[in-house]
Amino acid sequence: MRLQTALASAGVLVLGLAACSSGGGGSSDDDSTITVAYQKTAQFHQLDDLLQKAKTEYEAANEGRTIELVPIEAEQDQYFTKLALMNGSPDTAPDVIYEDTFQIRSDAAAGYLLPIDDYLADWDDWDQFLDTAKQAGLGDDGKTYGVSMGTDTRGLYYNKDLFAQAGLPTDWQPESWDDVLDAARTLKEKLPDVTPLNVYAGKAGGEQTTMQGFEMLLYGTDDELYDADSQKWITGSTGFEDSLGFLETIYTEGLAPSLDVALDASVGARVASELLPQGKLAMAVDGSWLPGGWISGDNAWPEWEDTMGMAAMPTQDGQDPGFTSMSGGWTLAVGSQASDPQAAFDFIALALNQENSLKYDTENSQIAVRSDVAEDPEYLGYNPSFEFFSSLVEYTHFRPATPDYSQISSTIQVAAESVATGQADAAQAARTYDDGLVGIVGADATQAAG
Amino acid sequence: MTSLVLGARTPGGVRRPRRRPGRAALRLLPLLPAVVLMAVFLAGPVLWSFYGSLTNQALTGYRAAAPEFVGLDNYTALFGDGQFWKAVVLTVVFVGASAVVGQNVLGMALALMLRATGRVLRSVVSAIVVVAWVLPEIVAAFALYAFFATDGTLNNVLGWFELTGPTWLITFPMLAVILANIWRGTAFSMMVYDAALAEVPPEITEAASIDGATGAQRFLRITVPMIRRAISTNLMLTTLQTLAVFTLIWVMTGGGPGTSSSTLPVLAYQEAFKFAQVGYGTAIATVTLLVGAVFSIVYIRVLKPEVD
């Protein structure tokens, strides 16, 4: 499974070399070609499907222009690295970029992205986008850098068959972390061959460890990462330590996957396409997009509707509002070195028009951000999990939108992995995080938890 | 040619010393292309990496667009970081166990044994050993990952004997990568020593045995001193190769679990490309370079071939 990681690393090296080779003749220099860089994996083919369709449509409508699709076959973490390296040289910088909302501020600050406000002003469809989706594309300077493709929420998946075998209710909604732990311990006792619960905690998992893992816990405590009012990062909070404590508990008690699985870069793919469908994992905190991979594609699993139950992630002790969730989402952005930004934007506008957004949001289980898609009966009827995950929007949180976030996220992953492996206890790991945080943002930009 | 030689002769011995500086420069001229190439492609990147390590260059964010010169801040942070010292220790353990001891001793042992066996066995065994060396690093790394993985070859074989193997890559990450590197690199040492041993004149060893020297004495007093130069070169090469091993460790353990197998190259990669701190990562790479230089100097000094 580390092959993917390795190939990605090898790819990074190749890209590094490509960036070194001197210019001229690069396809991105050619004004009539638009290069589109995006992520593609065995589990995540929906974006590729969408862009292939948009490519055909765009080329048919614009004679003489070519769309060059550059799929980057890597897990999320390596995808960011490869993008950053591609953006390092005008010869390799893509014209259109598939960009995570949390990277926007950071990459806009780095000068990799082009503000698209002028183009958006002439695009009638922009009015259809929800305000939250528009905000997700903003950079630190208040300009818009990305067009949102959809958003997501996160919750707790559980396998009803396994719950029934362990004598647990199949219509289940935990009210606190302890309820989740109790269920996990019962499962471990009754079904020793099944992994009770997955909460991501590996460094190799990248942002999924921070967002689907750690932040799903932290934002259910009384603390957060960042105080938006004072614009300071919080150190030494009880919630931070408790969240790490939860990870420590499940990994040391053997309630979570064994470390060889949990620390591998491919753990996310394995949970979605192997561990859950094969009934080897009973509960998983994960994103609303998982059913997208079960409905169609190589890992289709038609029985998922009857087997999988979904519950909202409870807050630590059931404190108000009772549940929590995290929302992110991805955008399409124009690269700052695009040779013809208008053409690049036109391609984005085509790829995210009503018809194509509908296709992508349904197939990839996204929560629609275009109102004309969200109200479409075809969208509402496509996937039975939409209703549940949309209902989590009222509990949801967004990640701190600062250019430093991606580095801070890496520090969180280090803390999570160190407690999962037992190399540090929750208190030590939290202190290491605090030190790392101060190192990144400086002591002036932090405040001790109140 | 002749006229050139004559032309050089005609001024006579008296004037020669005065013309030496110009002649020396002229004689060095043919070296210039080589020196320029070395400077551009070897010294250049080294200096560039050293400069990079004095900045706070990042992969994304404001510091990607406008990195600042931060002096020795990266090094100060590095030397105060427990993680770095752990990586130094792991690197020394990795190099010491897998290159200096593992590859060299095993390579020498194989070379000695092969010299004492028949031709058929000799070619079969060398072919098998060399296969590991022939494999591209990424292929070898994945093969070893498949071998040591929890449901991999090794544990399956242990399963035939009703044994349950541990999770090698999690429980013994350093052992796994050290064994992997020995497996991969021994062929090189074996070939170097095999060639060196072939150069030892059999008369000398024969004379020693007639004088009553035992096998061990012959090896230590005759063979080793005679192939000292090969040993020195081989130690240096394997050390430097092993110091630079990245793919093998990255594929097998990713430097983990936690930081249990993060050697200096892995740490540098993580800091630069995962944590996006290119400047800091470059500082680690520069330190790795210095460690390699120190090793080389030590080998050259200690095993300096005296006049023989």
Image (spheres, rainbow, N blue to C red):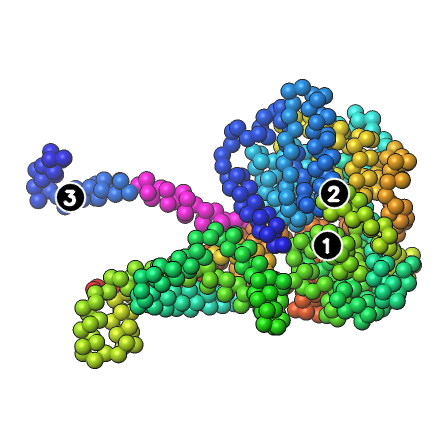
- What is the three-letter code of the residue carrying label 1? Glu
| Separation of marks 3 and 2 at Cα, in angstroms | 84 Å
Q: Which residue is drawn at 70% across and 22% down?
A: A60
**For the residues tagged 2 and 1, is the chain the same?**
yes
**Residue A88, image x and y in percent?**
58, 40
**Residue A69, image x and y in percent?**
65, 33
**For the residues tagged 3 and 1, is the chain the same?**
no
> Which residue is the site of mark 3?
B18
Q: Answer yes or no: do the residues labelled 2 and 1 have beta carbons within 8 Å?
A: no
How busy is the neighbourhood of tag 1: few (under 14 within 10 Å), some, or many (20 plus)?
some
Q: Residue at x 45, y 49 (%)?
A: B46
Q: Residue at x 61, y 54 (%)?
A: A2
> Can you see residue A410?
no
Between A239 and A280, the one nearer to me in the picture: A280
Q: Which of marks 3 and 2 is in front?
A: 2
B37 in the magenta segment = yes
Q: Mark 2 lies on which chain?
A: A
Query: Bounds of the magenta span?
Result: B32-57
Residue A296, located in which quarter of the rendered image? top right
- Where the N terminus of chain A falls, by quadrant? bottom right
Q: Which mark is residue A420?
A: none
Q: Is residue B146 left or right of residue A219?
A: left
> Which residue is the site of mark 2?
A297
> Can you see residue A174?
yes
- Where the C terminus of chain A falls, by quadrant? bottom right
Q: Is residue B145 left or right of residue A364?
A: left
- What is the three-letter code of the residue carrying label 3? Arg
> Which residue is the site of mark 1?
A274
On screen, residue B161 above or below A219: below
* Secondary structure type for disc 3: helix
